[in-house]
Image (tube, coloured by chain):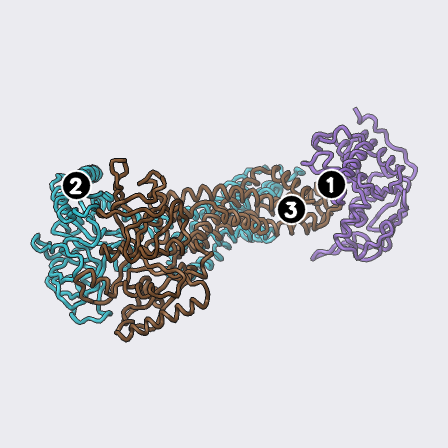
Amino acid sequence: MLAMRHISKVFRTDLIETHALRDFSLGVDAGEFVAVTGPSGSGKTTFLNVAGLLETFDTGAYLLDGVDISGLSDDERSRLRNEKIGFIFQSFNLIPDLDIFDNVDVPLRYRRMPAAERRQRIDSALDIVGLKSRAHHLPSQLSGGQQQRVAIARAIAGDPKFLLADEPTGNLDSLMARQVMDLLEQINEMGTTIVLVTHDPELARRAQRNVQVVDGQISDYRPFAAQAAPAMAGALA
Amino acid sequence: MFRDIRPVLSALLRNRTGAVLVGLQVAIALAVLVNAVYIVKQRVDLIGRPTGLDVGNIFVLSSAGFTQDHDRYATMREDLAWLRSLPDVRAATSTNAIPLSGGGSSTGIATTPEASSEQTVPMNYFQVDEDGLEALGVTLAAGRNFRADEILPPDLNSDRAIPQVIITKALARSLFRTDDAVGKVVYDAFGRPTTVIGVIEHMQGSWLSWDKVDHVALVPEVASWSDNAYLVRTRPGTRAAVMRQAEEHLAASNTTRLIKFVRPLDYYRDRSYLSDRNMAVFLVTVTVLLAGVTALGIFALATFNVNVRTRQVGTRRAVGARRADIVRYFLVENWLVTTAGVVLGCALALAAGYQLSRQFELPRLDLYYLTGGVLALWLLGLAAAWQPARRAAKISPSMATRTI
Amino acid sequence: MLGYYVKLAARSLRRNPGITSLMVLAIALGISVCVMMLTVYHGMSSNPIWWKNDRLYAVTLDSWDVQEPADDEHPDLPPWQLTYNDAAAVAASTIPLHQVRMVKTTAVLVPEDVAAGAQPERVMLRVTSADFFTMFDTPFLYGGGWQAAADAGPEPVIVLSREMNEKFFAGENSVGRILRWNDRAFRVTGVLDDWHPSPKFYDLNNGGFDDPEDAYVPFGWIAALELRSMGNTNCWKPESRNSYADFLNSECVWIQSWVELPDAAARASMQAFLDAYVADQRKAGRFARPDNNRLTPVDQWLADNRVVRDDNRLLVALAFAFLAVCLLNTVGLLLAKFLGNASVTGIRRALGASRRQVFLQHLTEAGLLAAAGALGGLVLAALGLLGLRALYATGSAGFRNIMHVDGWSLVMTVMLAVFAALAAGLYPAWRVGRLAPAVYLKTQ
């Protein structure tokens, strides 16, 4: 599904060069649920942006669902983002002045889909996340967890091959976080490949496979292989 | 002040586009403002020129007969006698043309009988009787008025010699290079002599847009060219009443004629200056709007700059900047933008001024106006940025630690 | 997709009503001033008989003083009018399809039956040839003009304007009725319908926007009644003039002459006719200046007469400078607004919007603004023109008549709106389209 080979990405300013990714290689198979972890500054975000086609890379090769990314134009990358990738962000990134329905509609709009098909897809995506009844609420009228579920609905409405989730529970309390993770697992079970980027080892444990990034490279170091989750129930009241 | 400029300048350079846009607005505004004010000043001066006439107390009455037995000259004599008998009428005369109206007669005269066309001076003439001077309210600077027995009878179709004439000082100067023209002789196109018996201090004639509008002569002759027209001068404050009275009486006194119009002399002056006055009105209106829109642009830029730097301002306050320092920071920033615009605007204003003087034959832009315009835009800029700068000064130092 | 962009734009404009109204106001002000000035300019410079531009010609001959041109400001042009005799000579030519000579004068007309309530009226009178009505395509409400024979007679016939027919005959069909002029009975042959050519192209030296005259009588009445012109009579030659006949035979110019020439051949032969006439007159000692015999089409006639004044050109330039400032203002506000909303654009980019789609979405917003501004501008322009009419309340009615929103103003508004949308929107939309999506996603 996703194959990165020897990717490097350098940020340059007048004074310094930062190697955000160097010789970064990662393969994700179709249907996998992979967690990418690492401390802040490790290159996680750059990996996310490159994997999500939000940024270009300097050297190396990246195949997404068999498509060679290098050399694609901005327009072609936009189309791939739209059709193959669903994004879930830590801060939800819903558009505040669009209602839930219209938020889920956004990626479909850029696909020139007939209105009836859009409506049907939005309905079923909202159904999956359990928010069909809230279709005409504004994001500000929903709780954080609900907002993130809307974001998930938006990510899956276009039926993407692969979901890219960036700290999806970072702004949520534990109950809501669990609901969101349950939802992601459920989506994964329906066949969608998921790459979860997080600094939270607890969250990463729920993935099928963990990959850690350190200094812009994949590290073999897996510190939390068999740790138990700390009790969180108390936070729910 | 100057220690503020460097950091402000570097901040500005980072948000170049907004500053450039406002600078351009200031530049165009300056170019328009300076030239518009200059043109308005010219028009106001033009309209404000002295007429030499007692405009506020004169009215014009014209009548036309509509039957063959209508005797226009008998009617004229009766009308004038009646008008002159009114206690509030100072004087009344028949006339061939209405001063300041845009319609009138002119001819050429010279100081020698055999003058070439270059030696001929144009003269705008008014046929009046012995009441003419008084009815126009002009001041006789030297010489004397016409005597009643000098007034020539009406004669429409012949070109006869005129024995006496009263001319304006301006015409005297053009003819004789001196005001002192009484007793001197001028010659008409046929080389026939006319004696100057009086000199008028100043009087504007028929065509206000003519550069020789003050080349006026009074000719002792009963007017005959068109329908009867009288210039009537009333005592101050009585004109409106006399106009009503005259219209009623004259319409009833003779049923073979029609009163064509009774109008104050101001009507003609206002009509002649209509386009000049309206040009000034347009220019002032658009310039005020322009200044308003420009101020809005400056205000918006300043507000934007304050908003995006809320945190930065908080930080500055946290490390000890006083409110006055913050206000000064934003005012200096704004002043730099305005000044850049003003510098460009000076060039634009001069270019526009040059273009105007070339294409529209206007005088070249006076540099005082440019100086005034620069000051005005500086003030406008400061005024427009004042409120956003004050608002910035109220930002709490705690903004430094707050995440937005 | 456009529908989606419009929906988004409308939503975005509603989100910041303050900034939106500022921008709409700026565009509206800029457009209104431009539309006002362009409407007036267009009204002044338009050719009210454009369909006959290549057929109608003003005839002028340079009979002026050898020592100086007739008009110092236009030394290359002959006098604006002809002498009585020259006009007669032109009229004698059989080359033109139609021709008129004419003079504007004034009269008092008296209805036959004063008891019926109609009063004597002072009227402006055009003393002209029978072809006037055909040549200048005047619409008739009742009846028609007079036969060419009536010119020479002259016959006491008269054509009234619609307004004058209202005054004298309460708007009834007055053909055959009588009006008295100096006790002579003139029979009405026709009443014109509304006819207000603006500018008054056929008589520009008596006020380019004056109303047409109230009544028309055959040209022969000039000599018969010893009429003088109400317009300019310009003389240069010291000639002994002791009778009206002397005046008619003088070098004074006061008669306006127009011919209708159907094609280039007719024009060429008319030109040859004029040249031959002038050559012949030279033998009699007239026409000392170089040959300057002109047949001027209406367009050129309007330009030669400087119907559009320098002030009007200046005001158009001023209006566009003002529009430029308004648009610069809008560009600044739009840019700030678009960039301030960059995070949402970042989301859209992440979700697959291409640069082009983002660009078009924002350009649509500018377009919507411009459309609202244009609508507001049109209203302001209509109000402004009303104000302008008030300013010109004492000016000529024909000039006031061009001061209203017409089809051309609408076309102008639409064009200005498109221009405003592009000028104000292109750069901000391009800038926001260039934003790198990733940068704006993490900032919340």
Q: Is residue C50 left or right of residue C167?
A: right
Badge count: 3
Disc number placed over residue A106 in the picture, else none: 1
B319 and B108: which is toward the camera: B108
Disc 3 on helix, strand or loop?
Answer: helix
Where is residue B106 shown, x and y percent of the image?
23, 59
Name the residue furthest left: B149
Residue type pointed to by label 2: Asn
Residues flagged by tags 2 and 1 on a common chain: no
CA separation, marks 2 and 3? Answer: 77 Å
Chain letter for brown?
Answer: C
- For label 1, count other residues whose C-alpha is less than 10 Å away and answer few (under 14), some (14-19) or many (20+): many
C204 and A31: which is toward the camera: C204
Disc number placed over residue C362 in the picture, else none: 3
Which residue is found at the position 79% from the left and 33% from the top? A123
Residue type pointed to by label 3: His
Q: What shade has chain A been given? A: purple
Name the residue furthest top: A237
Quarter location, residue A111: top right
